[in-house]
Amino acid sequence: MLRRFLPSALLFALVSLLTLPVLAVAFSWLQFNDEARSILVQMLQTVLPAYTGTSVLLCLCVAFGVAGVGMATASAVTLFEFPGRRVFEWALLLPLAMPAYVVAYAYTDFLQYAGPLQTWLRAAFGLQGRLLPEVRSLGGAVLVFTVALYPYVYLLARTALSERAVHLMEAARLLGAPLSRRIRGVALPLARPAVAAGVALALMETLADFGVSSYFGIQTFTAGIYKAWLSMDNRIAAAQLATVLLVLVAMLLRIEHSAQKRMRFAAGRGARAGAQDAAPVRLRGSRAVLAWLVCALPIALGFLLPVLFMLRPLVLGWDSLLWDKFLGWTLNSVWLAGLSALLATALAVGLAFAVRRQPHVLTRSAVHLAGLGYAVPGAVIVVGLLLPVGWLQAAAPQTAAGYWVTATVLGVVWAYLVRFTAVALQTMQSGYSRIPASFDDSARMLGTTGTGILARVHWPLLKRSVAAAGLLVFVDVMKELPATLVLRPFNSDTLAVVTYQLARDERLGEAALPALALVLVGLLPVALLSRTLRSR
């Protein structure tokens, strides 16, 4: 009897571990008393309208930006043939290697009033005062998020267009439709669900961001949560803001799931074969130049220029770089990322195997809940982990729960697992989808049951998926900022944290080294993703 219920109990424990922060934020409203009501009223009268207005306006502008750039680049490399198209197919993924806050630091250093560009313009032309708009503004944040996050739309739109659009556009051409009408009447409707899904993913990243909004001084929900908790020492206000942010993210997640379903419905079985029968439209002259510029400009703005801008202070401040501390920051980052990747991958394997072994509604629902963590912003996870600690310490002052969560690696690794196990789980489920169920039936007929199937049948076929899942989690943890900033143990700064702290203190020359190290690490999954796309 115990062996029968042990897997279900273990699955329930794992899912509870990964969903506790979200449940804690939701349950915080059970403590809604007169004090909480007065705080909420004060927030409605003061900061909440500003947080809401800024966050909504930022999301609307970023949505239009990433949708336009992502759709334009995906259409260019999928529907048309022009010089350099093969290079642009993978080069358009490069901004994924750039954390948005690194892009913000790079543009601020180069374009600010005392930066090299405005200094040169004033010296060369004898001008006075500010010559460019302020980078640290809502418009600057829109630019940063657009050039850093458009690959989400590009990837999904490119997949949707490559499956059917080329074939159907060729059919429309044979029927006499001009190129503009083929794009407007065939390509855009086919890509609309993919664009919606990509925009939703980009907006989830925008709402979850802390580095850009904090550095630019933008009053978003994430910045407000940290201000309420750390500056005002008001956990009730932080929990209420976290709840509002969680509701917004849940709405975006719903949009993303609905768009993904429409994408699967739109892709027919014969789509890939049909796409291979038709060739992209060859562009010449000014049209080819325009397509080249459409693809080159986002790469330059989202990757090449930020890297060059960060190399300048790195070279100029070479003698003042903190080389002795850099090794310690790197070791801390690698240690936390490696441990989290190992644990997240192990959890993902266990959860995916549970669904494979018992594919009933309860198991699928439990694993689905565990896989929603990636959509939860780091600020919400921090509040969701610290709230139960506060409740426990209030009930039992002698408990050491606060020490274990805030003074050891337990708290920060727990936050990483909540947020990034979903990344590994998605990769593992993709790997399992390529293993026929008949393999399991054959193994059972030969006397192998339970975890023996996982060890002898699944594991040899899942090694590449496990490696990919571990790599993705490793890189995500290396770049993660909000949860690490609050929950890291004492004297264990990571590359992401010191990059933020040095840039906040206007020490961009010293911040360039850890920032570029993060970019270098971020190139690993981009190379893996590019290789996967080329092999299709």
Image (tube, rainbow, N blue to C red):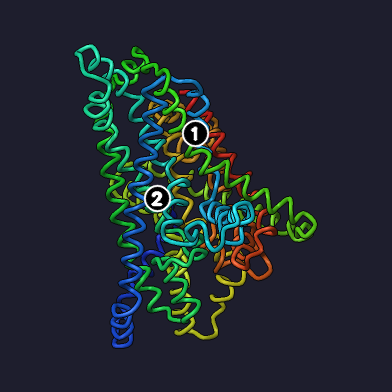
Q: Residue at x 62, y 49 (%)?
A: 309
Give the residue type at disc 2.
Answer: Gly
Q: Quadrant of residue 222?
A: bottom left
Q: Is residue 423 visible?
A: yes
Q: Mark 1–mark 2 contact, CB under 8 Å?
A: no
Q: Quadrant of residue 265?
A: top left
Q: Nearer the viewer, residue 289 or 64?
A: 289
The spot of residue 405 in percent (x, y) is 55, 70
The residue under label 1 is 296
Position of the C terminus, as image quadrant, is top left
Residue 371's tag is 2
Q: Residue at x 39, y 32 (%)?
A: 74
| Count of picture labels | 2
Give the residue type at disc 1.
Answer: Ala
Q: Give the residue furthest to the front.
A: 126
The CA span between labels 1 and 2 is 35 Å
Q: Quadrant of residue 10?
A: bottom left
Within-10-Å neighbours for mark 2: few <14, some 14–19, many 20+: many
Q: Nearer the viewer, residue 359 or 82?
A: 82
